[in-house]
Image: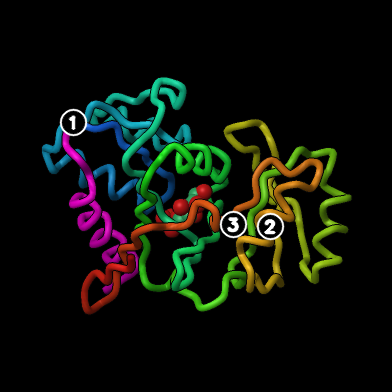
Amino acid sequence: MDQNALKRQVAQAALAYVEPGSVLGVGTGSTVDLFIEALAASGIKLAGAVSSSERSTKALAAAGIAVLEAGQVESLATYIDGADEIDPRGNMIKGGGAALTREKIVADLAARFVCIADASKCVDVLGAFPLPVEIIPMAAPQLIRRFAALGGQAAVRAGCVTDNGQHILDVRGLKISDPLAMEAEVSQWPGVVTVGIFARHRAKVALIGAPEGVRTLN
Ligand code: 5RP
């Protein structure tokens, strides 16, 4: 099975976590695109969705699903999104698609984060995937120095402006053995909008697509 088939498999499996009539939090990425496709084909009726990006908003609207602003809901039962890396405890690196800030905002509204990912995203320790960090552009040189002090090589992602009008740093060479501590530390550096470590908002459920079938981690 190729990676796309594995993504399609978990996109389909995620339908079991969608409560009909609810407002659903929807993430961003190629796996989520397949989930939106599966949701549209499933006939499940939602009251609406809160989207984490312009990309997902367009896909949801094209699928005939009403998109609500985050401010229109006080909470969500479930948020469904992909990941760039996930460890056995459900800690994740996200932001490969540059949507990490809105993803964290919508995840924060939700009681349950359901991660959908193919097995290539599973790691023991986060950090092989370059860590995305959304930043205010004027802070870039100082933030690059701060990451260098932690042993990371940070570079501004070329040609990338986020939905929030900001830039992304990609940080290579970090071994994130304590995701919660690193998320807390980096989040308070001046100029950081959002760090792509999702430890405070880790996945409560992970649906992992593998050739032998979907594995569920709780
Ligand atoms: C976007 C993300 C995505 O969830 C992550 O990049 C995974 O993407 P894909 O489903 O395309 O592999 O964090 O900001």
Residue at 63% over, 73% down: 177
| Label 3 sits on residue | 197
| Label 2 sits on residue | 170
Residue 20 higher or lower than 174, as above or below: above
Point out which mark residue 21 bears: 1
Q: Which residues are magenta?
A: 1-20
Residue 76 higher or lower than 143, as above or below: above
> Local crowd at mark 3 within 10 Å, few (<14), some, or many (≥20)?
many
Q: CA distance from mark 2 to mark 1?
A: 38 Å
Residue at disc 2, CB closer than 8 Å to ligand 1: no
- Residue projecting furthest to the top: 72
Asked if residue 17 lies in the magenta stretch, the reply is: yes
- Residue 50 lies left or right of residue 129; in this view the side is left
Asked if residue 29 lies in the magenta stretch, the reply is: no
First-in-chain label (2 vs 1): 1
SS type, badge 1: loop
Of the 4 image quadrants, the one containing the C terminus is bottom left
Residue 57 higher or lower than 13, as above or below: above
First-in-chain label (2 vs 3): 2
Of the 4 image quadrants, the one containing the N terminus is bottom left
Residue at 63% over, 69% down: 178
Q: Looking at the image, do the residues carrying marks 1 and 3 touch, with CB atoms under 8 Å apart? A: no
Q: Quadrant of residue 173?
A: bottom right
Q: CA distance from mark 2 to mark 3?
A: 12 Å
Q: Looking at the image, do the residues carrying marks 2 and 3 touch, with CB atoms under 8 Å apart? A: no
State the image coordinates of residue 76 (x, y, percent, origin top left). 35, 36
